[in-house]
Amino acid sequence: MNIRLTQVALASALVAGAAQVAVHAAAQTPSSVRVCTMPGSPSAELDKSVARAVLSTAGIAATFASRGIDDNGDDDGISARELSKSLQRDCDVIAGFPRSSVADGSDSQLLFSQGYLHSGYVSIALRGDHAADTNVAASDGKITIAATWSSPSQLIAVEQKNARFDLETTSKLTVDAVAKGRAQRAIVWYPAVVAYRRAHPQQHFDVAVAESPYADWNLVFASGPGTQQMQKRIDGALARLRSDGRLAALTRNWALPATIATGSATTRASLVRSPARYLDGPTQPSPRANVWRVSGMPAAGGFIKVAATTEAPSFDHDQVAHGEHLYADSCAKCHGEKLEGNTAPSLIGPAFAPAANSHLTIGGIYQYMSTNMPADHPGKMSDEEYADLMAFLLYTNGYDTGNAKLTAQAAQSSTTPLNAGPRH
């Protein structure tokens, strides 16, 4: 499994001082530009249409990169390092770059236009699914909520009470989890719902806005240093298209309908609980019981230690201790001192490692981490250090130590689902 940053997760990484990209500087007054869209973006069709109209209005000829940003045949997103390479090699401007107040990329070297689509994350359920509306879908009163791993979707989902989680690797699969009955609800970016409905017109969802600091996003044009004049021309073109109604016509079917932008009080109460709760730590900590703990780890919020399955790779005590130090130095500023999440998703609890039926594997997590993390310097650690960090994450999510050391090869090749130990 090859997991990398989703298009919105990439923007989230930028807010933490990540992705100090050295990008290709287009001419101050270009007569033509190469345009890329974000890989796997559900709004790619819209992004291209808006780019054609905007650049034509700005008097700039546009060619669309056939391969897109790091287009290698998958739709799993892009890392900050790959973004830098693509902007040097393939394109001068990105159409459909996501921005928000919590991930504005202010510390990056990218330049941004005004927004052309204001949208956000929503909670969806199959139309008429009363079990999802009342949060009663099982004997324990919990519902299953689908979310996209390592994205604002996951950050918002973890705020919900009385929920178990179905983590998917793309926004399309997140919507599909509701359509196919794997989950009663899903937290997903609204353009992904639009794209799914276009591919499956027979499918209907009840949609309500998700109130959260991580829910509000705008699509913009992004480019590298030295492109201020081009961005001014783009902003001028956007203003003209906005004033004559052409921009509204292009984006009408992609914008959040006014009828769901607020939602009913009853629906909103069942969808969103304490929007800022995630910033304060895990929503439902539980005792860890009398087990050996890594020094400095909280006495609540984790899982009871269980023996790793025979398929899971082994790791030892020293690796866990070293991994904790690596985490504190390189990961805690984004993922939280206690792995509870901050500007990046939580790395502990059922929203990261479900009790069962995880769609994420240990190998997939390791490959993502060793390729894309830390966000401000991807790949800076050695193979041994990434293995120790993986050992720390496994331990804090329910796996027990063994006698053999975890190697990078063993971690990367593991197909064991990342399932945490049960709570007691």
Image (cartoon, rainbow, N blue to C red):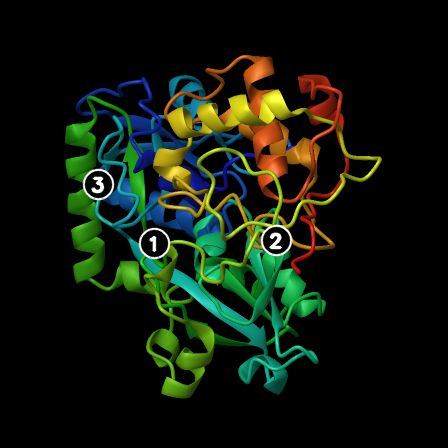
Quadrant of residue 280 in the image?
A: bottom left
Please give the label number shown on residue 29.
none
Q: Farthest right residue?
A: 310
Does 185 appear above or below 355? below
Badge 1, how many Cα within 10 Å: few under 14, some, many 20+? some
Ranked by sequence position, the earlier of labels 3 and 2 is: 2
**Whether label 1 touches label 2, CB < 8 Å:** no
Quadrant of residue 328 in the image?
A: top left
Q: Is residue 41 left or right of residue 21?
A: right
Please give the label number shown on residue 234.
3
> Tag 2: residue type?
Leu
Q: Is residue 123 left or right of residue 364?
A: left
Residue 188: x percent and y percent? 50, 60
Residue 378: x percent and y percent? 45, 22
Badge 3, how many Cα within 10 Å: few under 14, some, many 20+? many
Ranked by sequence position, the earlier of labels 3 and 1 is: 3
Measuring 67% from the left and 18% from the top, which residue is drawn there? 408
Residue 411: x percent and y percent? 69, 26
> What is the distance, in whole Å, between disc 3 and disc 1 at their CAs?
36 Å
> What is the distance, in whole Å, between disc 3 and disc 2 at their CAs?
37 Å
Which residue does the numbered mark 1 point to in the structure image?
279
Could you say which is closer to the camera, residue 295 or residue 97? 295
Measuring 30% from the left and 38% from the top, which residue is drawn there? 15
Q: Is residue 182 left or right of residue 198?
A: right
The quadrant of the picture occupied by the N terminus is top right
Residue 238 visible in the picture:
yes
Does 65 appear above or below 115? above
Which residue does the numbered mark 2 point to in the structure image?
167
